[in-house]
Image (spheres, rainbow, N blue to C red):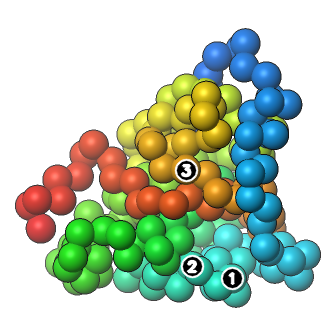
Amino acid sequence: MKKAIAFAAVAALTLAACGSDNESTEDTAADMTEETSEMTDETAAGDIVAVASSTEGFSTLVAALEAAGLVETLQGEGPFTVFAPTDDAFAALPEGLLEKLLLPENVAVLTSILTYHVVPGLVMSADVMAGDVATVEGSTIAIATDAGVTVNGANVTSVDVAASNGVIHVIDQVIVPPTVDLNSL
């Protein structure tokens, strides 16, 4: 499965971002800097997983990556753009859902959800444009820039957290691909 995800990432590297050509990247970048990242230059030297692991507020994401077997993939060459939900975002899920997702029998569902937060390629905040963007999971996410930047309605709260193999943009919700039926868990 890890090889399939890595292959999907490599196969889709050129699909990093799409959208309207009339969007101003300067305005978009200004909107995305509503909150600045609290990451240090020291964390930027590590890969996506190392940066998330060393940053307060991502322990649930790191645990989910471990449960889904995606750590090695996100430590790979990349580049990856990760829209990373915070611990608070995971805590806002319906009661008991996170525990169900972390069960071994739900690894496929958890993997789909986590890879839905990953866009192949390096997409910095200055490059973000409104539109649908392909994810590693295979579905698209909707990027909007009209009232700040949102990803499927989740607010981007910090941007351009550098990693050696990509970038992290922090979001305030866990987004779920259309291919996943959470009621079936």
- Taking depth in this image into account, of 60 and 34 the one nearest to the observer is 34
| Lower sequence index among marks 3 and 1 | 1
Q: How far across and down, in percent of the image, does residue 110 sit?
A: 32, 68
Point 25% across, 83% down: residue: 99
98 with respect to 156 (left or right): left
Quadrant location of the C terminus in the rendered image: bottom left
| Kind of element beneath mark 2 | loop
Quadrant location of the N terminus in the rendered image: bottom left
Which three-letter amino acid code belongs to the residue tagged 1? Thr
Q: Determine which residue is flagged by label 1.
A: 55
Task: Rate crowding at label 3 as few (under 14), some (14 to 19) or many (20 or more) other CA atoms within 10 Å.
Answer: some
Q: Determine which residue is flagged by label 3.
A: 155
Say if mark 1 contacts mark 2, CB within 8 Å.
yes
- Mark nearest the camera among 3 and 1 is 3
Task: Rate crowding at label 1 as few (under 14), some (14 to 19) or many (20 or more) other CA atoms within 10 Å.
Answer: some
Q: How far across and down, in percent of the image, does residue 57 sit?
A: 59, 80
Q: Determine which residue is flagged by label 2.
A: 58
Residue 4 in sight here = no
- Taking depth in this image into account, of 180 and 33 the one nearest to the observer is 33
Which three-letter amino acid code belongs to the residue tagged 3? Asn
Point 51% across, 60% down: residue: 172
The span from disc 3 to disc 1 (Cα, nearest Å) is: 19 Å
Question: Which numbered marker is on residue 122?
Answer: none
Q: How far across and down, in percent of the image, does residue 177 sit?
A: 33, 48
Residue 130 in sight here = yes
What is the quadrant of residue 28 in the picture? top right
- Tell how many labels: 3
Q: Give the vertical position of 101 relative to 34 (above or below).
A: below
Point 80% across, 74% down: residue: 39
